[in-house]
Amino acid sequence: MSVLLIAEHDNSSLSGQTAKALSAAARIGGPVDVLVAGLGAKAAAEAAARLGGVGKVLLAESEALAHGLAEPLAAQILALAPGYEALVAPATANGKAVMPRVAALLDVMQISEIVEVLAPDRFKRPVYAGNAIQTVRSNEATRVVTVRTAAFEAAPEGGEAPIETVAAVPDPGLSKFIGMAPSPGGRPELTAARVVVSGGRAMGSAEAFEKVLMPVADKLGAAVGASRAAVDAGFAPNDWQVGQTGKVVAPELYIACGISGAIQHLAGIKDARVIVAVNSDAEAPIFEVADYYLVADLFEALPELARAL
Amino acid sequence: MKIVVPIKRVIDFNVRVRVKADGSGVETENVKMSMNPFDENALEAALQLKEAGRAEEVVGVSVGPAKAEETLRVALAMGADRAILVEADGPVEPLAVAAILAAVARQEGAGLVIAGKQAIDDDASQTGQMLAGLLGWAQATAASRIEMGEGSARVVREVDGGLQTIEVVLPAVITADLRLNEPRYASLPNVMKARSKPLEKKVPDDFGVDSTPRLTVESTEAPAARKAGVRLDSVAELVDRLRSEAGVI
């Protein structure tokens, strides 16, 4: 079964999510071709060509494709779709925006955020914020699939796939990129981080995140996350939010500080290898899922932890 | 301008979802049901646009079981002008919902559809984008800010690594993220008033849509449980365990 993987990239580099989605794509079928749609995206295409198991890289470049806008990108994928039996993308903000549009225009149902490929037509995917796992079968002519990358290992480098330039489709002219305001701080991306340190409502303020939580994150080279309660209280920006309504993370180590453990938060950290919880409430539900926990005052335990690391 | 807001009835987000022992799905008997939280944000955004004089009418549309009428009544109590219930038993997939919504949007001559960015039951996050595709309209997903212009809207989107601002040509489909606004509560007098607001009942056939699922859900299982944790007495012990036992630092 021929597969087209839609690369996640910023033109100058390829996102690590692409290599993870490639692992899933390769289990659905092969050869796997990779579409790099952008502008000045040769470097990203070259990085894709180096991934092991890639058939060829298709490079499509135009102004309209420069920022991954859904309408032109969907049109580009649709132009290539007739040659493929499966279209796969990582479930990033871009992948989640564009793939359903593609699926609808092909008149097929998409399978969102798969965590396992059982067979080329059978997949596992979480529903209800990970509180249930469905096994889904698709008989659609074209499989349109997004991949929860936290569930897959990155495909190793070692390939030398050819890069083929394909004609960019005309801009549908429906949307325009105005600007991007990146999140502050040179920290790793939450969904890709090896260690995540998160704060909850008990942090009490944005200053406490800065003064008490950041030093621990700095020592560990960690990404910083927050519970929805902390975000709603204005202690942390929304793109730090971990959970059903935020980001799903799968780090080696997750440290939950002052997070009680609402169902919707736990849904976002289920795939972490080791969970540590620090909370002054001995009854906090987070302790039920933590591998190690401390019943302690955050404002004493976290500075001590920062010193000890 | 008329704004259409899709509304889904889902298990309340505070309920701990339980998987049925026979693997046929999740327990929904005697479980509290509510409006999908992101749909509340979408409706709030539409109501604010109407209050700001940018829209004349807000229409809530739900595709679902007869009981979804209750959820639409909540939408009417929050301030939607009227509602359409497209009754369908059993699960209706995003593609069929999008096809029904596309027909409604065309019939109503809608200038904007504001939907939730995902429903918290199937977590598919497809309907808005599919609808935009079927209509050939622009789309702006995961919106945290909407500014209406002349014939266009400027939308700030929550994307990986920050906030992206785009401009979309109207008509368009915008999907709402949590930070878009703080949804209002329906006051008791408005709940009473909502009972007499117009609610039209339809079926998928009325729109020429076959709502038979395309995908087969073979089974639904509970996720693997984590083992109960170990309570430690000191930070020193924690650091030691993370180093020597877990090997993660």
Image: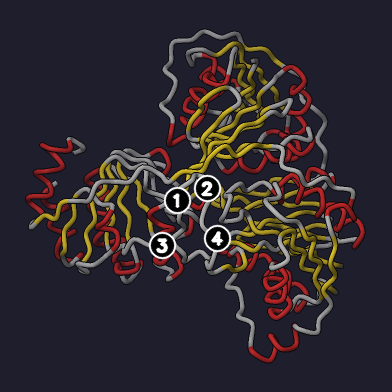
First-in-chain label (2 vs 3): 2
Camera-near label (3 vs 4) is 4
Q: Residue A236 got which mark?
A: 3
SS for callout 1: loop
Figure coloring: secondary structure
* Depth order, front residue of B71/B163: B71
Q: Residue A127 got which mark?
A: 2
Point out residue B226 in the picture as x, y percentages from the top left corner.
29, 46
Determine which residue is flagged by label 4: B28
Q: Residue A131 got which mark?
A: 1
Q: CA distance from mark 4 to mark 1?
A: 14 Å
Q: Is A146 placed left or right of A237 in the picture?
A: right
Amino acid type at circle 1 is Asn
Q: CA distance from mark 3 to mark 4?
A: 34 Å
Q: Residue B27 got which mark?
A: none
Name which residue lies at 55% across and 14% down: A54
Point out residue B149 in the picture as x, y percentages from the top left corner.
79, 62
* Depth order, front residue of A32/A134: A134
Discs 3 and 1 carry the same chain letter: yes
